Image (cartoon, helix red, strand yellow):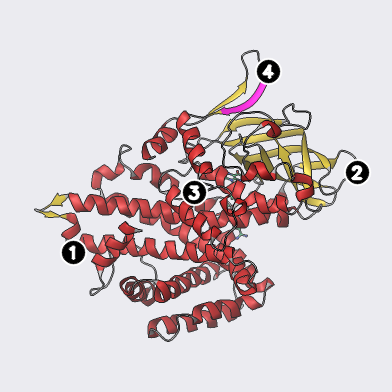
Amino acid sequence: MFALGDAANRNPPRLRLFDRFGARRDEVDFHPAWHDLMRRLVGEGLHTGPWSEPASAAHVARAAGYMLWAEIENGTQCPATMTYGAVPTLARQAEDFDGWLPLLLSREYDPRFIPAPEKRGVLMGMGMTEKQGGSDVRSNTTRAVPAAAGGPGREYRLTGHKWFFSAPMCDAFLVLAQAPGGLSCFFVPRFLPDRTPNTLLLQRLKDKVGNHSNASSEVVFEDTYGLLVGEEGRGVQTILEMGVYTRLDNATATAGLMRQCVAQAIHHARQRKTFGQFLIDQPLMRNVLADLALECESHIVLALRLARAFDAQQDEMESVLRRMLTPVAKYWVCKRAPAVIAEAMEVLGGNGYVEEGPIARRYREAPLNSIWEGSGNIMCLDVLRAFAREPRTHQVLEAVLAGSKGRDARYDRFVAALLTELENPADGEFRARHLTQNIALAVQAAVLLGNGPESSAQAFLASRLASGPPASFGTLPVGVDSGAMIERILRF
Ligand SMILES: Cc1cc2nc3c(=O)[nH]c(=O)nc-3n(C[C@H](O)[C@H](O)[C@H](O)COP(=O)(O)OP(=O)(O)OC[C@H]3O[C@@H](n4cnc5c(N)ncnc54)[C@H](O)[C@@H]3O)c2cc1C
């Protein structure tokens, strides 16, 4: 699997705009390793498993699998997460998309560029970002006009562009465009009902820092066929349902990415000798490794706690929690990845910085999940919005944190200060990162105290809650059980 991941990234996809006779194709060719990985990923149900086989902990189980997948390869996770997120949106309008839903739930990966009804399985992407703005999608200029009478499920014609349009070989996309009634969401398939290609004029593939296995394109729409999803003017709300799921995946995938790098660092330290001793036995290196391991564990538990809220959507309290904790986890887990992975790379010394090693590719992936699908600041502003729109949010957070109350004075003090701070509305935007970070730390501490091993909980309280998240790793106080934390992250 690692070899496939390397091959898919060393042999990036190529744009094939025209066929040999000059007719437009607008296709992307991928290396066989990409297809092999996609076949396995879809076969495991890591794209839509919780929708095809609902169970009490289906989202948690998928999140755990998705986390493991992130340890192998990340480009393939892009179409997988967009497909995961698209299903609930389309299921709301099942009368218009009932032919698509079974194909989205299929465990067969079918990469053929043919109309969906002829395929064994399909995947979905999305198009929101335009040149003038990705965060502020209301600035979108792509226009949509109804072909006849407008309305949900009806045909519209789209003209405009998308500046980022990843996985363009997906079979259909949710796309935002300005309809007569305002910004709206459209279902744009690659093929028309008459089985001829829809007009998706791919312009270029982005030359990205990392994520080389995956194609991210720029696209132009010219009288492009699309069906309205939801009501006209409700595009942001409609497409954000998809975004909620992809944001959960940003957190789980990034936790997995970090865990793989830290496991590689520990593995290296167990075998590398300096000054006559294995690195793993040298006290300062033990502090670095244990600190990295603790950081990873805290992100794994936060992402899985969030996934639990996705499983409990019928529970009102969990539903309120999910609304607020999704941007919190997306922000905090993704924000920590570049620092964690850079430190893991340094454990391998010079070997860490060469492409043959396991970390280089993952280092290039590290910043991505923080940027796309709502960059850091946008997530923090969304946390404020969650508190402003749903007054019970404060109370629900308090109840969740109360589960671990009374077990440690440092935790109790931290939680009390946080809850007071959240009641202060002054300069909310200016303080939004600080608030979001502290909510994340409080929930991580609550889960570690409630369910984690004592060694991790105690070290977390003594470091993160006592003096804030470390700017650099290897600063755990004397007395923590470094061996337990190092062993635990290897066993995860
Ligand atoms: C590899 C990759 C693949 C992508 N794939 C897709 C895709 O398939 N489909 C798609 O639609 N998009 C895709 N994107 C685009 C991505 O979602 C956007 O880049 C992202 O949402 C940010 O938008 P922007 O680039 O326009 O930055 P801007 O919106 O210009 O934001 C720039 C910075 O300003 C901050 N900011 C914005 N507003 C505020 C504010 N009010 N207060 C404080 N700070 C603010 C943001 O957090 C950000 O850090 C992809 C991006 C990448 C890198």
Residue 362 against residue 27 in the figure, above or below:
below
Residue 468 against residue 275 in the figure, above or below:
below
Task: Tell me the kind of residue under disc 3.
Answer: Leu
C-alpha gap between disc 3 and disc 1: 33 Å
Residue shown at the point (58%, 33%) measured from the top left: 110
Q: Regarding mark 4 in the picture, which secondary structure is present there?
A: loop
Mark 2 or mark 3, earlier in chain: 2
Mark 4 or mark 2, earlier in chain: 4
Mark 3 or mark 1, earlier in chain: 1
Q: Regarding mark 1 in the picture, which secondary structure is present there?
A: helix
Instruction: Respond yes or no on whether mark 3 lies under 8 Å from ligand 1.
Output: yes
Query: Which part of the image, by quadrant, shows the C terminus?
Result: bottom left
Task: Tell me the kind of residue under disc 1.
Answer: Pro
Query: Which part of the image, by quadrant, shows the N terminus?
Result: top left
Q: Residues within 10 Å of mark 3 (few under 14, many from 20)?
A: many
Determine whether label 4 and label 3 are within 8 Å by CB.
Answer: no
Residue shown at the point (61%, 14%) measured from the top left: 20
Task: Tell me the kind of residue under disc 4.
Answer: Ala
**Residue 197 in the image, given as x and y percentages of width and height:** 72, 28
Span highlighted in magenta in the image: 23-28
**Residue at which label 3 appears:** 368
Name the one closer to the observer, 156 or 119: 119
**Residue at which label 4 appears:** 23
C-alpha gap between disc 2 and disc 1: 72 Å
Task: Tell me the kind of residue under disc 2.
Answer: Ala
**Residue 264 in the image, given as x and y percentages of width and height:** 30, 50
Name the one closer to the observer, 6 or 468: 6
- In the rendered structure, the answer to whether residue 56 lies left or right of residue 265 reads right
Mark 4 or mark 1, earlier in chain: 4
Residue 226 quadrant? top right
C-alpha gap between disc 4 and disc 1: 65 Å
